[in-house]
Image (cartoon, rainbow, N blue to C red):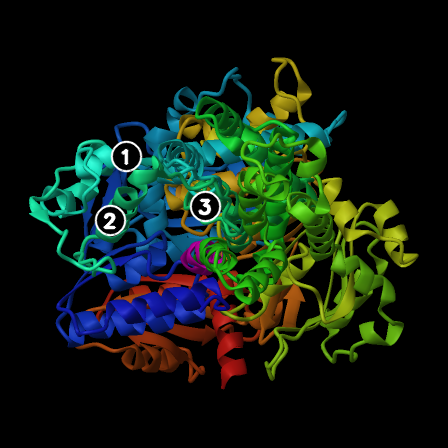
Amino acid sequence: VSTYSGGMKRKLSLAISLLGDPDYILLDEPSAGMDPYSRRSMWDVILKLAHNDGKTIIMTTHFMDEADMLSDRIAIMRHGQLIAYGSSLFLKYNINHLTSEGSSTTTGGYTITATCSSSEDRSKVLKQLRAIIPNVTDTSAGDKDLSVQLPLGAEKLYADALSIVNATGAPDVTIGLTSLEDVFLATVQDDELHGAVDSVTESPTTESSLDTQNRIWQKVDNKKPSRFRSVVQLAKFTFLTEFRTRSVFLFNCVLPIIFILVGFILSYVISPKGSVETPPSLDLLPSAITLGSTDPFYVQGDAFSPSALGAPLRWTSSLPSGGHLLANYESNGTLQYDPNIVSSLPLSLSAMTNSTLSNFSVSVSNSPLPYVKSVLVDITQLLVPMFTMMGFIPYAYVVIRIARWKDDHIITQLKLMGMPVRLQYLALFVQRLLFGFLPAFAVILIAAGGFGSELLGDGGRWFAYIMLVITTFFALIPFAMMLAPLFKTGRQASDSFPLMWNCLSIIPYIIIWILSTNSAESTRNIGEILGNIMTIIPTLAYQRGSQEILSLQFVVDRASGMEGSPVEWSDTFDPNNGVLTPILVNVGMFIASTCVVWYQTRDVISKQMKNRKRQDTLGGIPESKDLLEEIIRADETKEGIAVRNLTKRYPNQKKAAVKDLNMGVSPSEALVLLGPNGAGKTTTMKMLTGEEVPTAGTMKLGSREDFHAAEQKNLDINDLYRRQVCGYCPQFDALFPELTVKEHLRLGCTLKGLSTRSAVSSHKAHVDAIVTALNLGPYLNTLSEKLSGGNRRKLSLALAMLGNPCVLFLDEPSTGMDPSAKRSVWKALGGGSARPAMLISTHYMDEATALSTRIGIMINGQLRVVGAVSELATRFSRDVSIEASLSPGRSASDLASALSTALDGANVVVIEDFNHTATVQVPISDGLTPTEEIAELFRIMEGSLKEQCGVVYYNLKLMSLEQIFINLVREQRQ
């Protein structure tokens, strides 16, 4: 599933929601990210569920055509309130009642647009139109641009109106019915009128829309990116993300300190056992046994009861004696004692011997000599290292953050904002150092000193322990980073790594400790060997080193044979005592793992591009003229984007994800890629942004100097990214959920070397223009996880636009936005005179029309068609499309048959027919212009055909880009 495109994931989510045949279905933007062809397939499924299977469906969407096609009733909400409700036709007819009086400039009906040769012609046409339709509304924006709204109810006069406009000779006459999108836009006009009041930045300014666009794309000079500031800023914001997630902060910052304190408290509470022991002496006086008598007695009574074991010293001087004389027994009499009482035998023997020896004034005293054990068994040397080591475990969880950043494309986003991957890793290291290790290290020193731990003992033990702690931290972070490539997704890392790392850090040490304290020398040797091997893991090296420091006093005492022998510096750092080994291993692991991480983050793409042979970049010659022209354009492009025969094949895949892709995009141009889900659009973006390594082909990005370096095979792709040549808005938002919009922008400004402190700074004006154009002002202090999907896309787009990069990659930038928000984005991207070279992928045909210089349609990983919108329309659109709402019992075939008869047998084709909605395609007659054909069709429809075929309302237009796209995809799949 992780390899699926966004549209494929939406299809899977929809399929899961239908499992179990539910009666009520809730669909939240089910077609977001789907291409038009897939959306229509999904519509068929939803209509079948609603009308054939009787399901109740509540759905949200930002596609107005989807709402128009699928819904029985439409509800429009604003600021949490329902402001409009009804059928699509009802809303279109009552569009002028949807806003406050005087704020709406839209009325129901058709809109005719054209470009006249002069302002006088425009005024003349407008006068003629008002002569036949008095209540025509003029919505023209320019002196020569004509835009008039024809009211509903005057359809019979539309043909005459078209004839008047067509008589001017305008080359681009269009007509379209009031759409549901117009209805939606009318409901948000009040917000747009007051948007400037809500869009508050730190220093609000009032400027025109054109000034805002120019400030966005003006050349940004004096950028001073600082690696030091970038690392510190990213470390700071990374800590903020942890602090604002309470569970993460508790686990990563608070629990380590608690474990450290528990470890040292245990070392204080549990006294060491077994280093040097001196058992208490027992004074066995004759008077205590025989009360001064020299005659032997049979001793009995409390002296041999179990209670004597509890207080042996109390009975040594006042033992009671028995009353039976033993004089009649032989001198080699038998001693009887209770074997269940441990002290009965030695006490009885002492009584007999003292009784015998008392005649010679000899007394016996049991006073064993001190002894030193050959093997140290001390539970504190298991618990103290293990608990204090647990304070280091969360530092290794940097693996999870790296995996999540990769999964969320944050690493790629930061890289394209000028921060190489190695600096990102350094920032994570600094964050763990400043906000994790230093506080914990202070607690370690305070707790160890306060509880009198031998870890800070004399003879250099304190210095060895400090070095052990520091080297463990420095070795642990790169060691963990080295493991990051083992995890493909953030979910996989968060699910498996904590358990794996905890087991790897704790269980081996317990096993090694048990083996090392065994009485058998061979077993102890095995434990020593395993312990030395496992010190390559920094957490085990720490435990091993701590154990050796704690046992150093025992080692010195055993060597000297005296209790409390002083520990010297030479003893601490004697290689045979094992204290120095973990420290040196940590240093070695720090160097080795850092080298591995350095290798893992190398620039693979640049090396492959430099070593790629010429024949690897040569593809076949296309038959299509437009594709051949695109190859020539790619070769002739000197700055911007130039791609030649770019190919990507994944292992174990029969088909190439992208095959022989050629394109050239110069500054101020925008190439829009269209294609069904899985066509290769996102894969192309990933190759150009360095997330994927191309299998074959070459690419050149940036300025003329960068292109020259690429031709000389001296281009370093990572250097391009470091200089912020490229901006990237990924398909899925690469944002920090716990940071606000303002904090995201501050981070982006720091990485790109923009200063926003001065109120008159050109940098600040540039940033404010982006915020204003995208209407992010009201959300500056909102966490990104609290933003709507559309506003998150705006924030991702704003980060890509910061600094006015030379090249801009936008992967479905307006997905999840409402029509009003999309238009604000289009205005921001389409304005200005110094726009960058833009490569855009989208599923919105109106977005492609609004932003593109050229449109490329990708199918099955290959570019099939490329050209401007007008070129595609001329090439593929020689038909007029009629969309009609039919009364029950009527079909699209009836409408097509009637039109064919009225047009003298013209080949009228049914395109769509469902939910009482028909779309038919009528060819343009020879000798007629598209506008004249539409005028003729109006006359036919307003004659008898409208009533004859049960047409409720209809819309005439030339074949749209969406229909061209659907037809091409259908042909390829057939």
Q: Position of residue 904 (x, y in %)?
A: 42, 82
**Cα distance, mark 2 to mark 1?**
16 Å
Q: How crowded is mark 3: few (under 14 residues within 10 Å), some or many (20 or more)?
A: many
**Cα distance, mark 1 to mark 3?**
50 Å
Count of numbered badges drawn on the protein: 3
Amino acid under disc 3 = Met
The residue under label 3 is 386
The residue under label 1 is 285
User: Is residue 242 at least partly visible in the picture?
Assistant: yes
User: Is residue 837 at least partly visible in the picture?
Assistant: no
* First-in-chain label (2 vs 1): 1
Q: Decide if residue 260 is on the left or right side of residue 336.
A: right
Q: What stretch is highlighted in magenta?
A: 492-504
Above or below, 388 against 112 in this view is above
Mark 1–mark 3 CB contact (< 8 Å) = no
The outermost residue toward the right is 712
Amino acid under disc 1 = Leu
Please identify the quadrant where the N terminus is shown: bottom left
**Cα distance, mark 3 to mark 2?**
40 Å
Q: Decide if residue 583 is on the left or right side of residue 531.
A: right
The residue depicted at 42 percent of the width and 26 percent of the height is 781
Residue at disc 2, secondary structure: loop
The mark lying in front, picked from 3 and 2, is 2
